[in-house]
Image (cartoon, rainbow, N blue to C red):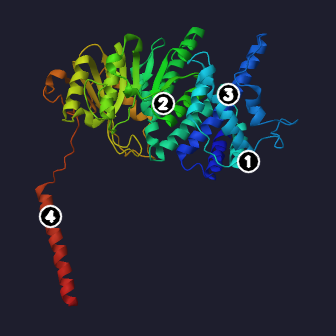
Amino acid sequence: MFEQTFKNIDDQLWKDAGCSSELDYVEQTSWILFLKYLDDLEKEKKLSAELMGKSYQPIIAPEYQWEAWAAPRNGNGKIDHNNALTGPDLIDFVEHQLFPYLKRFTTTADNANTIEYKIGQIFSELRNKVQSGFNLRGVIDLVDELRFQSQTEKHEMSHLYEEKIKKMGNAGRNGGEYYTPRPLIKTIVKVVAPQIGETVYDGAVGSAGFLVEAFEYLKNSQALSTSDNETLQTRTFYGKEKKSLAYIIGIMNMILHGIEAPNIQHVNTLAENVSDLQDKDRYDVVLANPPFGGKERGEVQNNFPIKTGETAFLFLQHFIKILKPGGRAGVVIKNTFLSNTDNAAISLRKELLSSCNLHTVLDLPGGVFTGAGVKTVVLFFEKGAPTENIWYYQLNLDRNLGKTNPLNENDLAEFVRLFSSKEDSQNSWLVNIKKINKDSYDLSVKNPNQIEENNHQDPMEILKEIQSLDQKTNEILKTISKLL
C-alpha cells in the first residue's frame, strides 16, 4: 500500500508546474510527510501520557495541527472536503501562516537538541514549491492515508524513503551526491564497529545514510537498556551538511528511522579552521563519503595546514583532526588520492600515514556509484599511532556494476570475513610501510596475487590463422575477377 501511495504522490507532483525533478518530488513530499509523521507522534505521546495518568502538552498549536488544516474529519472519520482547505486558500494558508508559524520554533524551543528546534530548522530551510492548491490537496489526501503508529509501519516507511533518495540519486544532475549505496555503508559500519557510548560523526552528511546505518547497527547489536536508548537518541550521532536540500533529507531520514531530534547542523564543515578544534569537539568514530571534484576558494583552503582546492582532500584533513586519539574512521575517497603526484596529495598521504594507522584500503570497482563514472577506495584508519602495515583488498567481481546490477552485501562478504585476520588471498595482500617510496608516498593498488590470464597464442596457431585468412582473401579476389 505504502509503495503505491508514494507512486501516486509522485504522479500528483509531476502535474504541478512548480516541481520539475526527482529532487523536487523528494523535497516537497518530505515536508508534508514530516507533518503527518509529527501528528501521529503527538497522538502516540498523548496516549502514552494518558495511560500513565499524566497530561500531554502538544508541540503544535491546535489551529496548525494536521487535522485542523490538512485533514479535518467528518462523522465517518473521513476527510471532510467541505471544510478542508484547497486551491488558492490552501496555498495562502501554507505559505503565509503555516510555514511562518513553524519557522518560529527555532526561537521558542528550549534548546537545539529538541524536536521543536528541528521543526523550526526544517521549515526555515524549506519553501512550498507546489503552485496549484488542487495538486497540493491531492498530495495531502494521499499522505493522510499513511500511518506511523507501529514499528512495522515506521520500518516500511523509512525503507520507502530510502528508495526515494536512491531514485533521486539515479536521476542524475546533482542528486547522486546524496546517495551512497547502502550495501557499502553497511559494510563500512560493520568493520569499523561503533560501540554504544561512542560518538559517531559524518561531516558530509548528505542523506544521513552513514548515521542511519550506524544507528541500525547499534540498535541491533545488543539488548538495549533505557539508558542505552537515551544515549543513542541524544548523545551518539552528529553531522554537518552545507546544502539545504541534503540537510532536510538527512534530518527527515533520521527521524523516519527513529531518531527524533537528530544532531545535524546546517553549516559548511570546511569553513571551520581545523586548528581551532578542541578536545570537546572530537569524535570516536568518523564514517563519511565526502564530495570530491570540487574546487574550494582560497579563504576555505586557509582553514587547513595542507592547502588544496580539492574538496575531498580538505574533508580528509578535517576528519583526521576531528577524531579523538584512538578514534576510528571509514572514509570513501576517489582512488586517485592514492597516487596523485601534486604536492598536496603527497603531503596529505604523508600526514595520514604518520598521524594515523591506515590499516586497510578497500579498492572498489567502477560502477559502485551509479552515474558517477569514477573508481573509489575506502580508507580505514585509527588515529594516534603511525602506519606500519597496510592491508589491501581489491573487490573483483564477475559482472559490470550499474543500475540493473548494483553492488550488494554478498559482494563484500569475503572482505568482511578476511578483515579481522588481514589474510592474504587472490584479492588481498599486506604491504609494509617501509616498502613505500618516501618521496612520493605512492599508495597505489598493485595486486601481487592477481593471476594473470595467459593471452599469448601459440605461434603455429597464428600461422594457421594467417594461412586461412590468405585462402579466404584469394577466393574473394577470384570471385571479383569473374564478375569483371
x and y percentages locating residue 373 in the rendered image: 35, 45
**Relative vertical location of residue 265 with respect to residue 294 in this rendering, above or below:** above
Q: On the image, numbered disc 1 is attached to which residue?
A: 87
Residue at the spot 41% in from the left edge and 26% down from the top edge: 203
Does residue 260 appear in this view? Answer: no
x and y percentages locating residue 369 in the rendered image: 40, 41
Q: On the image, numbered disc 3 is attached to which residue?
A: 38
Q: On the image, numbered disc 4 is attached to which residue?
A: 464
> Which quadrant of the rendered structure holds the N terminus?
top right
The amino acid type, in three-letter code, at marker 2 is Gly
C-alpha span from label 4 to label 1:
80 Å
Residue at the spot 67% in from the left edge and 27% down from the top edge: 38
3 vs 2, front mark:
3
Quarter-of-image position of residue 319 = top left
Q: On the image, numbered disc 2 is attached to which residue?
A: 209
Q: State if disc 1 and disc 4 touch (CB < 8 Å).
A: no
Quarter-of-image position of residue 436 = top left
The amino acid type, in three-letter code, at marker 4 is Lys
C-alpha span from label 3 to label 4:
77 Å
x and y percentages locating residue 342 in the rendered image: 19, 35
The amino acid type, in three-letter code, at marker 1 is Gly
Q: State if disc 1 and disc 3 touch (CB < 8 Å).
A: no
The amino acid type, in three-letter code, at marker 3 is Leu
1 vs 2, front mark:
1
x and y percentages locating residue 214 in the rendered image: 48, 23
C-alpha span from label 2 to label 4:
58 Å
3 vs 4, front mark:
3
Q: Earlier in the sequence, mark 4 or mark 1?
A: 1
Q: Earlier in the sequence, mark 3 or mark 4?
A: 3
Q: State if disc 4 and disc 2 touch (CB < 8 Å).
A: no
- Viewed as shown, does residue 101 lie left or right of 300? right
**Relative vertical location of residue 21 with respect to residue 115 in this rendering, above or below:** below
